[in-house]
Structure formats: C-alpha cells, structure tokens
Image: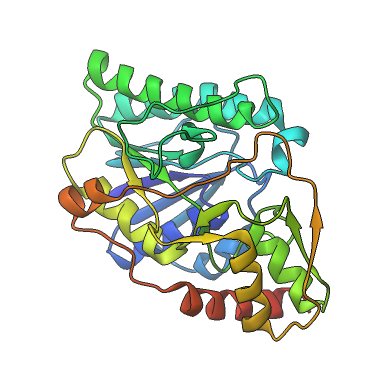
C-alpha cells in the first residue's frame, strides 16, 4: 500500500513510519515540524520506499498518484503546547482533519484518525470505555486539545456517513518511548530528564492522580491492527495497568539510580485525576493488548534519553 502519515516526523508518527515500512508499504511522511523533528526520520532518508514532505496539513494537501491509506497523526499533543500553540492545535484538529479527509475522499483511501484519551476529559467513569461521552471543560486550558480531537472524531464520522470514506478512529492513552521531546512537558520526559540530572522529580498535587503508560511499539501495533481491521467506531488503545504518579516517580528514580527523591507543586487546572483505558473492545475486535512491561519500556527509554541529553 502507498500510505500518507501526517505528523510523520513526530514521536509516534516516526515509529509508525518504521512499522509501515517494515510491513512492506510505501510511506509518505508529512509534517510542518512545529513539534516534530527530521532527526526522528533521518534513518529513513535512504529508504527508496520513504518520502518526506514538509507541509502544513491545515493547507490543501496535494499528493500525485494513488494513495491507499492515510494515518492522520498531525497535532501538538503535550501540555506545554496547550497554552503556547492553542490556535495551531485547534486549526490542525479542524482544518487539518478536513484537508486529510478530503485527500482520503479524493483518492478513495482508508483513513485512520489519531484521537486521544483526552476526549474523556477529567473522567467521572473509570476505567473509560469507548461508550463514555466524557467530562470536558471546553473553555479550560486543556480544552483546545480536547475539543479539537472531539471535533475531529465527529468530522471523521460525518465523512464516513455522508461520503462513504473508509474511516477508523483510535483513542490513544499515555504513550512513551524513544524520540519523545526532551522538553515535552509530559510526565515521562519530565521525570527522565530530572532523574538523569540527579534532580528531585516534580510531582504535581500529592501524586495520587493516576495514569497508565503504553510503550510506543505496543501503541503502533494496535494502530496498525485497527487500520487493517473493519472496525469503524472508536477503539481505545492503551495499557490498563494503572499507576499513581507518586508510584511512577519512585519507579523512574529506581530505574535511573536517582537518589534525589521528589518535590511537590500544586496540581494544574483540569489535570485529570484518573486515567485508565477499558481495552475490552481492542481485545475483542483487534486481538490486541500491550506486550511491553513498564519496567522494560522504561529501561529502553532511559537509554534513549541518556544519549539524547549528551
């Protein structure tokens, strides 16, 4: 297949390009590098089945020739991006999804939209199944990302219903691994960089808030399975094992050999208190569940961060 990956130079996007190429597909990665980096795809530059196009997907997308599939991953996705890139986030969720769906319609291509657990907001249902409609503060600091993705899901389903575009929607939960930005603002890069510098890890609130952590190869595996499946409605892909942030901080300190402990700061506004996917649908329709343990994944991630921080 000839496949376009928007956001292809990003953390997840670059790993997806690797997987698609390994499966024998031809890949066109598209990115405006607002948060992505060509460093993430430099190792693919000599691959005859890989092409990189510098482009902002909120503008009209032109691809010559046939396109069989589109993975729409383009979007800043970190908490530090929400206050600094709010308009760009809203534009790529709305205009970018519209342009990518337009390409899918024109080419008769299968379309996978990368959504997020953030559509559930600060959830009142736990764990979160796909049937839960969410608890989102649309005018809060996280609302730009939450609502951009919720709109993108609605637009994707509209194109499926009205234009018969063959669509898929994946709801991604916390994912980590090599190629994350060092100053990403999410908990894994924050803790990794602090620990490797011998600093105390910054825990917001009392650390009782929970997250589940999915290693990037597991996420990409689930994403690929969903793309190749016949499932139209959203599917959660994430790790159902739940950790408190305080537990996670202790584990990172242990893995990195950091003895500086933790320090506490106030909890940011609208920060979700609990986040864990119900993956019964992914198990049932995709035969998917995560394979990489948190301890194993953190070891691999530490190796990357050590090298990247030199």
Residue farthest to the bottom? 257
| Vertical side of 310 occupied by 273: above or below | above
Quarter of the image where one finds residue 283:
bottom left
Which residue is drawn at the image coordinates 27% and 35% (left, top)? 109
Residue 172 image position (x, y, % from top left): 43, 47
Residue 139 image position (x, y, % from top left): 66, 19
Query: Can residue 209 be seen here?
Result: yes
Quarter of the figure with the C terminus: bottom right
The colour scheme applied to this rendered structure is: rainbow
**Near-viewer residue (111 or 235):** 235
Quarter of the image where one finds residue 262:
bottom right
Side (left or right) of 266 relative to 33? right
**Near-viewer residue (45 or 205):** 205
Side (left or right) of 245 relative to 169? right
Residue 108 image position (x, y, % from top left): 25, 30
Side (left or right) of 28 relative to 201? left
Quarter of the image where one finds residue 111:
top left
Query: Can residue 49 be seen here?
Result: no
Residue 238 image position (x, y, % from top left): 39, 54
Which residue is drawn at the image coordinates 50% and 78% (left, top)? 295
| Vertical side of 275 occupied by 104: above or below | above
């Amino acid at each position: 297949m000839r496949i376009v990956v928007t956001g292809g130079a990003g953390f997840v996007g670059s790993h997806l390009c690797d997987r698609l190429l390994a499966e024998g597909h031809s890949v066109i990665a598209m990115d405006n590098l607002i948060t992505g980096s060509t460093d993430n795809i430099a190792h693919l530059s000599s691959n005859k089945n890989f092409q990189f196009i510098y482009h902002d997907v909120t503008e009209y997308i032109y691809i010559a020739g046939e396109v069989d599939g589109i993975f729409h991953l383009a979007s800043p996705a970190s908490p530090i991006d929400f206050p600094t890139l709010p308009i760009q986030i809203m534009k790529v969720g709305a205009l970018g999804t519209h342009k990518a769906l337009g390409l899918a319609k024109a080419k008769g291509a299968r379309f996978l939209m990368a959504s997020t657990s953030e559509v559930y907001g600060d959830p009142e249902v736990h764990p979160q199944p796909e049937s839960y409609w969410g608890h989102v503060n649309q005018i809060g600091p996280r609302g730009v990302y939450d609502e951009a993705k919720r709109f993108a899901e609605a637009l994707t389903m509209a194109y499926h219903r009205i234009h018969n575009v063959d669509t898929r929607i994946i709801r991604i939960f916390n994912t980590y691994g090599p190629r994350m930005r060092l100053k990403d603002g999410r908990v894994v890069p924050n803790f990794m960089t602090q620990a490797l510098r011998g600093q105390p890890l910054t825990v917001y609130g009392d650390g009782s808030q929970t997250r589940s952590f999915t290693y990037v190869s597991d996420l990409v595996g689930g994403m690929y399975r969903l793309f190749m499946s016949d499932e139209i409605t959203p599917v959660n892909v994430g790790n159902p094992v739940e950790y408190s942030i305080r537990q996670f901080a202790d584990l990172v300190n242990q893995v990195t050999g950091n003895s500086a402990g933790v320090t506490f700061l106030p909890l940011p506004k609208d920060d979700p208190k609990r986040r864990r996917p119900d993956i019964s649908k992914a198990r049932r329709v995709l035969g998917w569940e995560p394979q990489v343990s948190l301890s194993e994944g953190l070891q691999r991630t530490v190796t990357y961060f050590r090298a990247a921080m030199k």
